[in-house]
Amino acid sequence: MKANVRSIRKQRKYSEEFKKRIVSDFESGKYSVPQLERLHGIRNPTIYSWIYKFSTFNEKGIRVVEMKESSTNKLKELEQKIKELEQAVGQKQIMIDYLEKMIDIAKEDLDIDIKKNYGTQRSGGSGNTQKKKNIP
């Protein structure tokens, strides 16, 4: 028969120097909290408590929020979005210029003023239109 075996809870003690080194690694931007957690085998809440205690940047009552995406990646994404939007605006401007040219051609060749007649109803006729001749 086996004896009654209980697991012993391990509690680690870290020196104040080690804690401050972990906080300085975080503050310098070398490592994120999840990276420090994996690297040293220390739980995430423990690291955050050290940050609150030893950080030179944090004040009492202010919460530390670590961004998952770096600001450089976010900046690159925003620059790409701006580039796409500028391209879309450029294509729309080309289409506007084309349509304005077509309106000008319709006015010159077919004597139809599309801008003037924009709000009027269409006629029921479907015959071809011919250019009107100016009779003095």
Image (cartoon, helix red, strand yellow):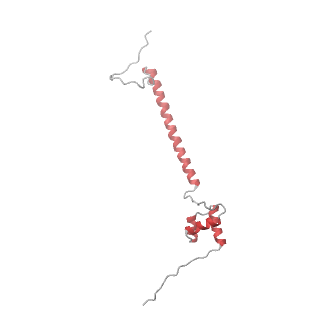
Furthest residue toward bottom = 1
Looking at the image, residue 81 lies above or below residue 70: above
The foreground one among 60 and 15 is 60
**Residue 136 sits in which quadrant?**
top left
| Quadrant showing the N terminus | bottom left
Q: Position of residue 122 (x, y in %)?
A: 36, 24
Looking at the image, residue 14 lies above or below residue 61: below
Q: Position of residue 43 (x, y in %)?
A: 55, 70
Residue 133 falls left or right of residue 32: left
Q: Position of residue 98 (x, y in %)?
A: 48, 31
Q: Position of residue 107 (x, y in %)?
A: 45, 22
Q: Residue at x 52, y 38 (%)?
A: 90
Q: Residue at x 49, y 37 (%)?
A: 91
Looking at the image, residue 26 lies above or below residue 14: above
Looking at the image, residue 74 lies above or below residue 99: below
Residue 26 falls left or right of residue 104: right
Residue 18 falls left or right of residue 131: right
